[in-house]
Image: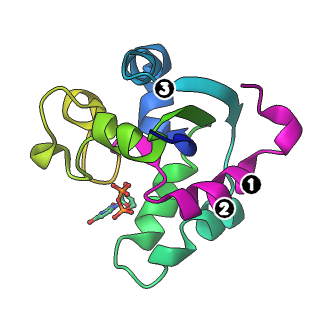
Amino acid sequence: MAIERTLSILKPDATRRNLTGKINALFEEAGLRIVAQKRIQLTEATAGQFYAVHKERPFYGSLVASMISAPVVVQVLEGENAVLAHRGVMGATDPKKAEPHTVRAQFAESIEANSVHGSDSLENAATEIAFFFAGTEILP
Ligand code: UDP
């Protein structure tokens, strides 16, 4: 099995409700190691750029507003098949469709305020990690 890294974001709905520890515990229990982590405030420009792939979607403006409504915690998670493992712990985008044990089923407020972001491919993970972290900030 391949050791991978993926980019994770604890979204404003999670930081606002003080859920970072509970969510991190689920990641660690799934074998993912937090090798970088910082609490930051996204701006309209940075959140818009991060979600640029969704620019034409009807929810884009609302998603960007939601992502800048409070600080987020950005993190790099490392582990075996980290991209898929993390997506598994996160659960489906829509919490109503997420498996019961997942972060989104347990904590998400809505399809938009769904508590966590996770890279959806190894290629996107590398791009998204570089968006937020310098190599020297990642300490395996
Ligand atoms: N999103 C939304 N409405 C939708 C679909 C997505 O508000 O109908 C938001 C939601 O916060 C989601 C993010 O846009 O996490 C990115 O969407 P994507 O389809 O990439 O889902 P994810 O990879 O986060 O599960």
Residue topped by disc 1? 130
Report the residue at 56% width, 23% height from top.
33
3 sits to left or right of 120: right
Q: Give the class, few, some or many, for how many residues have Cα within 10 Å of label 2's Cα (few <14, many ≥20).
A: few
Q: Is residue 93 visible?
A: yes
Report the residue at 47% width, 39% height from top.
82
Look at the picture and state if 18 lies above or below 67.
Answer: above
Residue topped by disc 2? 127
Residue 137's quadrant in the figure?
Answer: top right
Q: Give the class, few, some or many, for how many residues have Cα within 10 Å of label 1's Cα (few <14, many ≥20).
A: few
Q: Amino acid at mark 3?
A: Leu
Provide residue 113's location: percent of width, then percent of height: 35, 46
Question: Which residue is nearer to you in this view: 21 or 120?
Answer: 120
Q: Quadrant of ligand 1?
A: bottom left
Q: CA distance from mark 2 to mark 1?
A: 5 Å
Q: Earlier in the sequence, mark 3 or mark 2?
A: 3
Provide residue 110's location: percent of width, then percent of height: 24, 46
Question: Which residue is nearer to you in this view: 87 or 49?
Answer: 87
Q: Give the class, few, some or many, for how many residues have Cα within 10 Å of label 3's Cα (few <14, many ≥20).
A: many
67 sits to left or right of 45: left
Residue topped by disc 3? 32
Secondary element type, mark 3: loop
Tell me if the residue at label 1 has its CB under 8 Å from ligand 1: no
Provide residue 105's location: percent of width, then percent of height: 19, 34
**Residue extent of the magenta highlight:** 114-140
81 sits to left or right of 137: left
Q: CA distance from mark 1 to mark 3?
A: 19 Å
Q: Earlier in the sequence, mark 1 or mark 3?
A: 3
Residue 74's quadrant in the figure?
Answer: top right
Q: Is residue 136 magenta?
A: yes
